[in-house]
Image: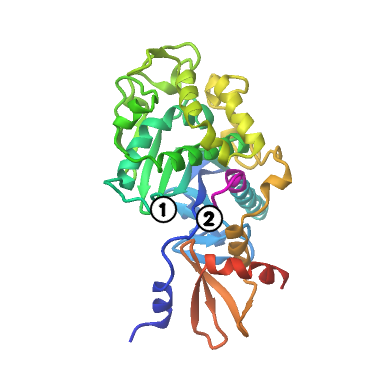
Amino acid sequence: MVDPKKRDRAAAPQRLRMAAIGMEAECALLLDGQPTRPETLFGSPRDFIRGELMHRQGTSYHLPTGGAVYFDTGVIEVATPVIEIERGCAARAGRSLWEALQFIRGELDAWDARKGRETRLVGFSAHYNVSFELPPGQPANGRTIEQLAELLTYILPAPVMLLATNRRSTGVGVRPREDRIEITSDFTPSAALMIATATLIVGIVREVMTWPSYGLDELARRGIPVISGFQPMPHTSRKGWLARFDCYPKNPFACDIDSEPWNTERHGQRSLRAIAGQTVRHFWRSIGRMADPYTFRLIGSVVRGGSPSLLDLEDRPPEYEHVGRLCAWDGLFPPAQLGRSRYERVVIRAVSGQPLRMDGRTLRPVGMSGWSAIVFQRDDASREVIAIDDLIERLEDWERA
């Protein structure tokens, strides 16, 4: 006989109905100034986070902010809930990510006080996830998410370098992940620049997704600059592609981004900033459709050189070395632009454990099935899995309760 819990979980939807984004950040952990594996020091996030946490899977737990925290091969990783794609979605995702980082920093501060130790979070990497689907009603015509990932590896690196990376960076990656594209880069110790990076990525990825072909010949046809001699390599973690420093004729993270010339395949010699700028201009409208006003201006200013890029600095700035202290949420965004998305609100209701009255029944949230569904326990102790899409229409009642 099939376990009812397993049967209910198996019935959970695999895809969200609305396109969504999500962000993740990885931080290394230092204890009294020495690198330490979090799984060795704590075993589980529950060993330093106070209060009840909804278990996710393995050492992963949901946070009161709606995100999740887990240990991943020597780093502490935090992730946002899914946030539906619309104008300003990257600002909402960035706010959610930094809320989670500040929450983790606060819990570590309390642990430090109890134990008489000192922990530090050091920024390591950031991941930007964007839903993938072909335009409605269009045949695939050979278009695959793997082809899209390779094509994006030629488009995204230059502008992402200007917005997100530093002098010690090693590369920008693109990984196909079933129904989403994941862009990997450095952690950025500026919430505003991280949100700018996410906005640029979602704007470009969602636009390229609509192209009738994902072949590399689209680059020449659309006038997108490509550095001569660039050859991406297989990603070092999971399948995908990586634009690493040694995939170029010289290290782009160590160059003068304004004056040092790069040979391009069809556009002569250009500086790295000029290459990034030409790419951004090509996708300016699609980026604008995703951007809040502040971020839209910031992207343009960094690309033009009016606002500093981390690559304008001589070295990686010290803010990386103490996430939550030397770098934190900067409060530059008007609160009206940061309101929680519907998906995020549903997840926060579930994580809080607040019961839901539905059709005369009381359902108590006890877990999540991926990011797409909530697992509820009925009055008779059986379980029911409901897609977060189906819970949106009940969200206001749930919140009022």
Q: Nearer the viewer, residue 316 or 352?
A: 352
Q: Is residue 241 visible?
A: yes
In the image, residue 79 lies at what x, y percent? 52, 52
Drawn side of residue 263 relative to residue 88, left or right: left
The answer for how far apart the CA atoms under marks 2 and 1 are is 21 Å
Q: Quadrant where the C terminus lies?
A: bottom right
Q: Where is 123 relative to 250, above or below?
A: below
Residue extending furthest toward the front: 137
Left or right of 79 on screen, residue 98: right
**Residue 80 lies within the magenta run:** no
Q: Amino acid at mark 1?
A: Pro
Residue 237 in the image, given as x and y percentages of width and height: 34, 44
Residue linked to disc 2? 82
Can residue 326 be seen from the camera position used here? no
Q: Which type of secondary structure does the marked residue at label 1 adopt? A: loop
Amino acid type, label 2 = Val
The residue lying at 53 percent from left, 40 percent from top is 198
Label 2 packing within 10 angstroms: few (<14), some (14-19), many (20+) = many
* Residue found 63% across the figure and 46% down from its top: 95
Q: Which mark is residue 260?
A: none
Which residue is label 1 attached to? Answer: 136
Q: Is residue 46 above or below residue 105?
A: below
Q: Which residues are magenta?
A: 84-94
Q: Quadrant of residue 390?
A: bottom right
Question: Could you tell me which residue is drawn at 54 percent across and 76 percent down?
Answer: 376
